[in-house]
Amino acid sequence: MVVLFRDVLVTGLRDPPSRTAVVSQMHEVGVRSLSIVNLTAIFTGMVMALQLGWFLSTFGAKIFVSRVVGFAIISELGPVLTALMIGGRVGAGMAAELGTMKVTEQVDALRALGTDPVQHLVVPRLLAIIIMMPLLTAMADLVGVLGGMVIAWLELSVSPSFYFTSLVQFLTLGDLWRSLAKATVFGAIIGTIACHQGLKARGGADGVGHATTATVVKASITVLVTNFFLSKALLMFA
């Protein structure tokens, strides 16, 4: 996977992909993933506000629910949950598509025609997911915070204006920057794993299924493990 990522960097800089190919992949990765990302984010924000609001109310501190929910979503849950959803939907799709092309010898046909499969197949996909992951994460952060606001208003009697005022006073641009930085790294991880698993698929339909399953498992575990080390490293610049 490291070698594949290196080849993508070298090939992409030497011979950038066509804008049409990248935009098509961005639509597949980003626009078609909005519903599942937003649904995950809004209910995560709602349940966090409900649980944390009830806990904080026992100490008379429910007015700070926006700070706890906002910081948790923007710093951790937004990028991580978005990455897990994208890994399950987009990563699996990439692996299945490339795996099918591999077992049906379409990749070998590209090589026979003098076309580099990495430049033609991998670079647009990896570039698209790296671009779209921060945008999807920013959307998830916003939707998650709004979901928490609704529950804080209906269940905890915290007004929306106070909710956002308290949140803005607490959060910094550094918190948002760390969230988007994580998302960019997660996008590179998911795209690299998916393309690698797809291109090494063997054995017909069974091999494609195995590559798809392996992509979801490996991408999810790698995202969760990498999140810890990224959080520790980024907090050094807080």
Image (tube, rainbow, N blue to C red):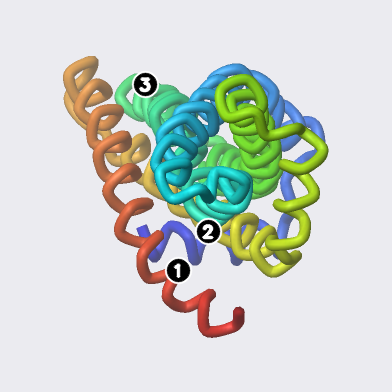
Q: Are marks 1 and 2 in contact (CB under 8 Å)?
A: yes
Of the numbered discs in the image, which one, if any, rests on residue 143?
Answer: none
**Res 216 visible:** yes
Look at the numbered disc 2 and give the secondary structure of its residue. Answer: helix
**Percent x, y for residue 42?**
57, 26
Which quadrant is the C terminus positioned in?
bottom right
Viewer-nearest residue: 138 or 128: 138
Tell me if residue 106 can be seen.
no
Q: Which residue is mark 3?
A: 100
Asked if the residue at tag 3 contacts the one at tag 1, i.e. Cβ–Cβ closer than 8 Å, the answer is: no
Disc 3 from disc 2: Cα separation: 27 Å
In this view, 236 is above or below 158: below
Q: Residue 65, percent across and down?
A: 57, 45
Q: Amino acid at mark 2?
A: Val
Left/right placement of residue 82 relative to residue 22 reads left
126 or 17: which is nearer to us? 126
Is 235 on the left or on the right of 202, as rendered? right
The residue lying at 53 percent from left, 27 percent from top is: 46
Q: Nearer the viewer, mark 1 or mark 2?
A: 1
User: Foreground mark, 1 or 3?
Assistant: 1
Q: Residues within 10 Å of mark 3 (few under 14, many from 20)?
A: many
Compared to residue 47, the image places residue 39 above or below, namely: above
Q: Which mark is residue 230?
A: 1
Callout 1, which amino acid? Leu
Amino acid type for the residue under numbered disc 3: Thr
Above or below, 12 relative to 117: below
Quadrant for the N terminus, please. bottom left
Name the residue tied to disc 2: 185
